[in-house]
Image (cartoon, rainbow, N blue to C red):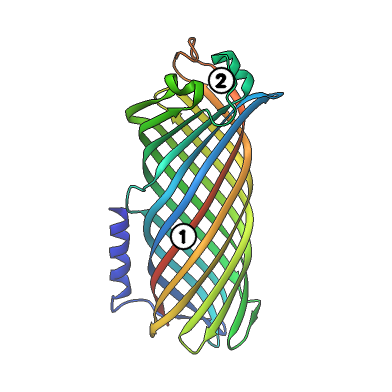
Amino acid sequence: MQIIFLIAFVMAFLFSPRAVTAAPFGEGELITELGIKSSYLKGHTTYHISYYEGSSGIESKLEFPLKTYLIGLDGAISYKENSRERFRFGFSIMENIDNGSGKLKDSDWLSDDIDISLYGVAHPGKDIYSESDIKLDALIIDLNMSYSLFSSKNLSFKPFIGFKHQGFSFVASNVAQTGYGPYSSDFTIYVPGEVLHYRIRYEFIYGGVDAEFLIGKDLRFLLKGGAGYVYAKDRDDHVLRYKLATAETDGVGGFLSFGGDYRIFKGLRLKAYGEYLKFSTKGTQHQYFYRPTQECPSGGCDAYVHDRINSEQWSTSLILSYEFE
């Protein structure tokens, strides 16, 4: 409902006879641009934990699918002199409009000595694997500023800085688990209903360069790339096991995008582009049993394990916007 309200507001604003126009500013003018943005996001966000004492240890990897359609607002305020953009502040805010798709993939490995202690035989490789249905809520916010370092009739280069927030919330249900080798009899099971609640947010501070190529008066091609610092924070509640895991990690991220911008007629523009983005972070996960279980009969058991939180994403977007000149 919030997205519908925002879109209705923007559409009413764009086609209102009182719509704002460019405002004089110094030797140039300030231009306002507003539009509707739709995207398809594909990829994953994954955490991989491990704990070892010498060669003895365990590992677990949970890969959450990012397959969803998003819609929201895209806009900018720019400063132009002689019809050339000198400075630009842009923003976008998007939410998903479906429940997401794909399966949560959960893989577990135990070292050979643990296999032997449990079942009397070593089992190299993956020991337990499961898949679950997911429901996804996503929110992505991007703020950026650019400055025209070089500009000619057909080419411009703009260094930029920006901040991107990504928040993903998952509810996993209907787990189908398979145990391999000696784990088959005890760990092959299907459990209906909710099994896991997971939240992850990324905060990405980045910088880079934007190159624009103008063809004629109405068509532009854009190539944009950047990199920067990533902070990630997640929370995983295994509701069936009464186990809560939280982590804070940090690392690096980078992205590359390519697209086109076509002026349909004065003020109205259609933009299309694709983007590849990757995050890689490391830190520590805290695990805590908040109720007594078979794994922790007394309740309150906790542990700290090494954690890697990574994400790889591909997106395609269409933007229909109006520039007030």
Expressed as whole percent of the image width and height from the top left, the position of residue 89 reads 53, 68
Q: Residue furthest right?
A: 54
Could you tell me if the residues under marks 2 and 1 are in contact, i.e. CB atoms within 8 Å?
no
In which image quadrant can residue 157 be found? Answer: bottom right
| Quadrant showing the C terminus | bottom left
Three-letter amino acid code of the residue under disc 2:
Asp
Few, some or many residues within 10 Å of mark 2 (<14, 14–19, 20+): some
Residue at mark 1: 315
Three-letter amino acid code of the residue under disc 1:
Ser
The residue sitting at 44% across, 71% down in the picture is: 272
Expressed as whole percent of the image width and height from the top left, the position of residue 31 reads 47, 77
Can residue 85 be seen in this snapshot?
A: no
- Whole-angstrom CA distance, mark 2 to mark 1, is 38 Å
Toward the viewer: 289 or 25?
289
Expressed as whole percent of the image width and height from the top left, the position of residue 2 reads 31, 54
Label 2, secondary structure: give it: strand
Question: Closer to the camera: disc 2 or disc 1?
Answer: 1
| Residue 88 vertical placement versus 39 (above, below) | below
Toward the viewer: 2 or 316?
316
The residue sitting at 46% across, 47% down in the picture is: 167
| Residue 154 vertical placement versus 133 (above, below) | below
Label 1, secondary structure: give it: strand
Q: Which residue lies furthest to the top in this view?
A: 298
The label number, if any, that marks residue 303 in the structure image: none
Seen in the image, is 132 located left or right of residue 307? left
| Residue 90 vertical placement versus 297 (above, below) | below
Seen in the image, is 174 located left or right of residue 148? left
The residue sitting at 59% across, 89% down in the picture is: 153
| Residue 216 vertical placement versus 88 (above, below) | below
Expressed as whole percent of the image width and height from the top left, the position of residue 168 reads 44, 45
Few, some or many residues within 10 Å of mark 1 (<14, 14–19, 20+): some
Residue at mark 2: 302
